[in-house]
Image (cartoon, rainbow, N blue to C red):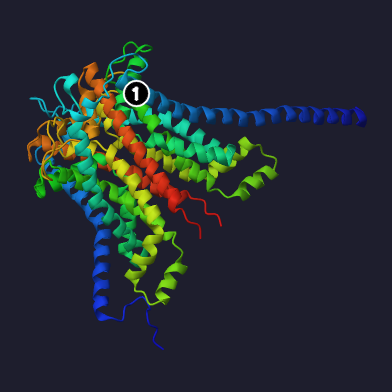
Amino acid sequence: MAVTDLRKPINPVRAIGERIIQIALLLAAAVSIFTTAGIVFSLIFETIAFFSEVSIIEFLTDTEWTPLFANQRFGIWPLVSATVLTSAIAMVVAVPLGLIAAIFLSEFANDRVRRTVKPLLEILAGIPTVVYGYFALTFLTPLLRNFIPTLSIFNSLSAGLIMGVMLIPIVASLSEDALSAVPNSLREAAYGLGSTRFEVAVHVILPAAISGVIASIVLAFSRAVGETMIVAIAAGQNPRLTFDPTVPVMTMTSYIVQVSLGDTPYGSLSYHTLYAVGFTLFLFTFVLNIFSYWMVRKFREVYD
Amino acid sequence: MSAQEQLGVKAQTVETSVDRGSGNLKWRHFKGKILTVLGWFSIIFGLGMLLVLILDVVNKATGIFSGGTNWLTWEFFNNFDSRFPARAGAKAAIYGTLYTITLTIFFAFPLGVAAAIYLEEYAKDNWFTRLVEINISNLAAVPSIIYGLLGLQVFVRWFAFGRSILAGALTLALLVVPIIIVASRESIRAVPSSLRQASYALGATRWQTVWHVVLPQSIGGILTGSILAVSRAIGETAPLITIGALTFVPFLPRNLFDVFTVLPIQIFNWTSRPNDDFRALAAAGILVLLAILLTINALAIYLRNRYQKRY
């Protein structure tokens, strides 16, 4: 006996209409593929054009980045070091505060506190980054200069610290999700063995949720690496290879902003540097995102 | 040594270990107290920074605590940018944000919802569907400035839209579509399949079921998610700077192909001028921006509560 699909229309005109709608919807879903393809191809296309003018060896070994000066040097390291430095400072703030907040909210706080505090903390992640940049430059830097008189007006310290504040809710929220997902049977078993609340939280629940917690930290780091306005406003525009947090530096994202603010002729070498730097940035975040994805899949404890 | 003495020694050992145990237990519970205090500290630190930020911006914009000049005046909304702080306003930026975001919604909302409908209601479990799903979660994690480089290459150069509102809105649309897709899928998935089956049983086709049953049931979640995506677009600065939105625009855009600026870029521009008056103008701009975002998020929360359904 033939089974009829009830969802298929009997009227042939309507059947054609249904088909057209389905194809239109499929195209909408395919736009995301086109977006990725567009990103990858435009980055690769212009990066290849860049490396036809500048040797890849110079890009990876030179320690100076001066493409806009008469004496052009194309070493990516000053931009990479500044990106890593500001991101690392941000993690020093975001990881301990975010993780402790997550453990507290998941294992110690009652339901009412959790439901009030989590959305409040998430406001921090919704503030536009240009606002954080303004705050770092006009509030935190003058404040820190009272304690560190040698601190430059533009520095990676206050940019990094403020970026860390912005990332607290990412670590806190995603880690809290991972901790809450650990089944109650584990908590009950640990309490049954005479563990205290602290021991349940830190020795049982945290290890059980560790993949999700690490994924949240890696994701926050990836956000810090790609963050633009805070560092463009507060960290300076001076490409230099240093890990001194008190001096102006230039991250990969600040460089893209600096070149974009000027008038860059299409096809010029400085136009190509945008994409070479953008491609490097994309690789960094891509590797971090894949790692975070892999971490969750590989080390996830499966409970039934 | 007698057996009793041995026993006594043993009993003593047991006693000391119990004593140490109870002292240790206090310490074990105390560690929990420390963590609670640190937990509250983290939360209060985060929220305290938010409060300080807002108070600082309010003070710099209006001089309300320090008795300075109030920059948040009628002229601020009604003047174009100027080289003189006293004459500068955010009119072009506010209109620019309004036009750009309206156009972004126009592109992103139908696209995101259509993609979500396809993935939830039509897609078979095959390689294409899996590719689209992995791709969407990857796109959500790409830094926004990379979208700017995409927009610069594709919309500004290849499509020759120039540094226009159209190019800016298309770039922002690509940036927020993944957010809309994820939120819409979640909301569509929450519609119970019994409703769909009832619709099919009445003779409705697949699209009729989607349009008349699934969408009306899930519209609350779709709208909430889309509004949050819009609030993300409103605050975005980097991709628009990258596609070449101007920082000094003393006129209103006349059509889709006109150059433009938006509120975050205007704030950035005023912040980068080493002059306290311009920094105060930037603070006034920030207040306007935060007020817009607050209103929009309140709307999202209202919609979520209004349409919240339990099956």
Residue B62, position in %: x, y?
Answer: 31, 21
Foreground: B114 or A45?
Answer: B114
Q: Is residue B201 visible?
A: yes
Report the residue that reaches farthest toward the front.
Answer: B74
Amino acid type, label 1: Val
Where the N terminus of chain B falls, by quadrant? top right
Foreground: A146 or A92?
Answer: A146
Position above or below: A198 against B208: above
Residue at image mark 1: B58
Residue A294, position in %: x, y?
Answer: 40, 49
Residue A62, position in %: x, y?
Answer: 19, 29
Q: Residues within 10 Å of mark 1 (few under 14, many from 20)?
A: many
Q: Secondary structure at mark 1?
A: helix
Please indicate whether residue B287 sits to the left or right of residue A105 in the image. left
What residue appears at the point 42 percent right and 41 percent down from the top-left corner?
Answer: A216
Position above or below: B152 against A98: below
What residue appears at the point 19 percent right and 32 percent down from the top-left corner?
Answer: B91
Image quadrant assignment for residue A149: top left
Position above or below: A38 against B265: below
Please indicate whether residue A37 sits to the left or right of residue A297 in the image. left
The chain to which mark 1 is attached is B
- Please give the count of numbered marks on the rendered protein: 1
Please indicate whether residue A251 sits to the left or right of residue A112 in the image. left
Image quadrant assignment for residue B61: top left
Please indicate whether residue A89 sits to the left or right of residue A207 in the image. left
Residue A218, position in %: x, y?
Answer: 39, 40
Image quadrant assignment for residue B235: top left
Q: Is residue B125 visible?
A: no
